[in-house]
Image (tube, helix red, strand yellow):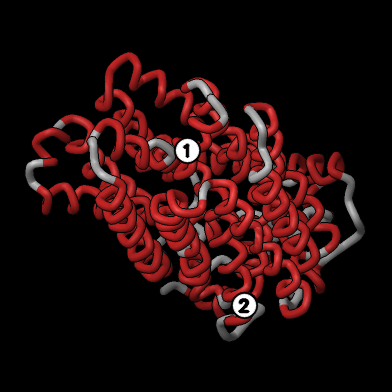
């Protein structure tokens, strides 16, 4: 470790892991992602009951992803102005409301509007939780902290798989959605027990309008960084969403697997992702962010290849099929790196706005993911559909090297967006 690294670790604003912040943020993110992906597991019964066409289903799969971009910008800005704790409460309220309203949908347009509301809350929650945890964690373990928070993602997907596949046939999709909106209780917990970021409190300057925040990003020379971070998110999240939004349907329709086996295979992928995320944090703190993004993305591509082009043979070899799904999940674990990487690129007074804009605009582009995959499936079959995430995984492995290595960067030392050094 060189002298700058040691200095960054020594001047870090925190000296121990913030357990309470992690637990509350983890619960918020886990149920955030659960609400987001649950719809994928309910799509078949919802489509049947509301008489939705295949094209309408593809749009509905993507609408929450699309609105999450707007939510990330809006709530990211508000969190920089009013604090991380308060705005996290708002985001949980919004995505819980959207889920509850979806239970009362009567047709395509009502589902679309309610899923849009869900996406707004989902988009805001990610950046708030990651910024708060990054600002409260020692720099020597910031990668691990972000990974431990992001690990709520596969847990949420696994819970959605169990509820969507196993509980829905018993109580129906409307009851599942209504019960899932109980996540609103997390807002109360966050409001009562979540501490505010000390770094934000100490470095917060005057309130900025959204236009002023954008101008400061421009003056600070962060536009190109945001664009590169956005494209990394487009490629990596594109890999994830072009695969996982359709995987439940692929398993049942193309692979002709029963619900029970589909559930087990989805849980296998999520177990791999959970383990991949936890390992990513430790390895990224030791070897750097970029090399881990590359290695994980290459593993994703290797796992997708046999699923795309040799799936019929793979189905006759259950251990290999399980291995491919586990490897796919393991490689997907590099999403655990976004929280630390993006937090280490931006100054405190515009960190949440910058992180939320960069990450969630990339997620917002995923509105097109189900539509693109559906088109490739129509033209080229299953191989065409799964080739989309395969290509995006390779793009991720290469593009991450356009960003700087940020391991051990001292967040407090990043020049403020309002400092004189910007002019």
Q: Residue furthest right?
A: 206
Given residues 343 and 318, the one toward you in this image is 318
Q: Residue furthest bottom?
A: 16
Mark closer to the chain start, 2 or 1 = 2
The disc at residue 12 is 2
Compared to residue 13, the image places residue 31 above or below, namely above
Which residue is at 27% across, 21% downward?
Answer: 381
Q: Nearer the viewer, mark 2 or mark 1?
A: 1
The disc at residue 45 is 1
Mark 2 vs 1: CB contact within 8 A: no
Compared to residue 148, the image places residue 272 above or below, namely above
Which residue is at 43% across, 39% downward?
Answer: 245
Q: CA distance from mark 2 to mark 1?
A: 51 Å
The image position of residue 407, as x and y in percent, is: 48, 64
Which residue is at 55% across, 23% downward?
Answer: 56
Query: How packed is label 1: few (under 14 Cα within 10 Å), some, or many (20 or more)?
Result: some
The image position of residue 335, as x and y in percent, is: 45, 53
The image position of residue 145, as x and y in percent, is: 51, 71
Which residue is at 63% across, 54% downward?
Answer: 178
Q: Is residue 53 visible?
A: yes
Compared to residue 87, the image places residue 400 above or below, namely above
The image position of residue 269, as x and y in percent, is: 31, 54
């Amino acid at each position: 470790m060189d002298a700058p690294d040691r200095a960054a670790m020594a001047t870090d604003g925190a000296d121990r892991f913030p357990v309470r912040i992690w637990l509350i943020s983890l619960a918020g993110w886990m149920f955030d992602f659960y609400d987001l992906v649950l719809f994928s597991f309910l799509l078949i019964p919802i489509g049947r009951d509301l008489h939705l066409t295949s094209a309408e289903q593809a749009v509905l799969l993507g609408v929450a992803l699309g609105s999450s971009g707007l939510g990330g910008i809006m709530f990211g800005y508000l969190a920089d102005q009013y604090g991380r704790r308060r705005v996290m409460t708002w985001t949980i309220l919004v995505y819980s409301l959207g889920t509850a309203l979806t239970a009362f949908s009567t047709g395509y347009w009502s589902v679309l509007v309610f899923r849009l509301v869900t996406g707004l809350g989902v988009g805001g929650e990610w950046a708030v939780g990651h910024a708060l945890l990054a600002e409260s964690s020692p720099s020597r373990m910031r990668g691990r902290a972000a990974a431990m928070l992001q690990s709520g993602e596969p847990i949420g997907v696994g819970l959605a798989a169990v509820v969507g596949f196993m509980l829905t046939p018993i109580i129906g999709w409307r009851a599942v959605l209504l019960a899932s909106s109980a996540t609103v209780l997390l807002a109360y917990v966050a409001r009562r027990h979540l501490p505010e970021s000390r770094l934000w409190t100490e470095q917060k300057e005057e309130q900025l309008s959204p236009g002023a925040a954008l101008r400061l990003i421009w003056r600070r020379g962060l536009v190109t960084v945001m664009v590169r971070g956005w494209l990394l998110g487009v490629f990596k999240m594109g890999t994830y969403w072009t695969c996982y939004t359709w995987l439940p349907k692929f398993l049942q329709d193309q692979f002709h697997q029963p619900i029970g086996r589909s559930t087990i295979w989805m849980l296998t992928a999520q177990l791999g992702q959970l383990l991949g995320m936890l390992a990513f944090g430790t390895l990224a703190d030791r070897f750097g962010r970029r090399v881990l993004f590359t290695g994980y993305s290459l593993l994703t591509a290797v796992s997708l290849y046999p699923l795309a082009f040799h799936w019929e043979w793979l189905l006759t070899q259950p251990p290999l099929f399980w291995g491919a799904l586990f490897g796919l999940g393991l490689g997907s674990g590099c999403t655990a790196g976004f929280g630390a990487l993006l937090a280490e690129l931006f100054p405190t007074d515009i960190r949440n706005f910058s992180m939320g804009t960069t990450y969630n605009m990339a997620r917002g582009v995923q509105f097109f993911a189900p539509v693109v995959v559906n088109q490739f499936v129509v033209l080229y079959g299953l191989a065409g559909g799964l080739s989309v995430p395969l290509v995006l995984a390779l793009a991720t492995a290469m593009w991450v090297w356009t960003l700087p290595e940020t391991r051990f960067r001292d967040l407090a030392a990043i020049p403020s967006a309002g400092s004189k050094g910007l002019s």
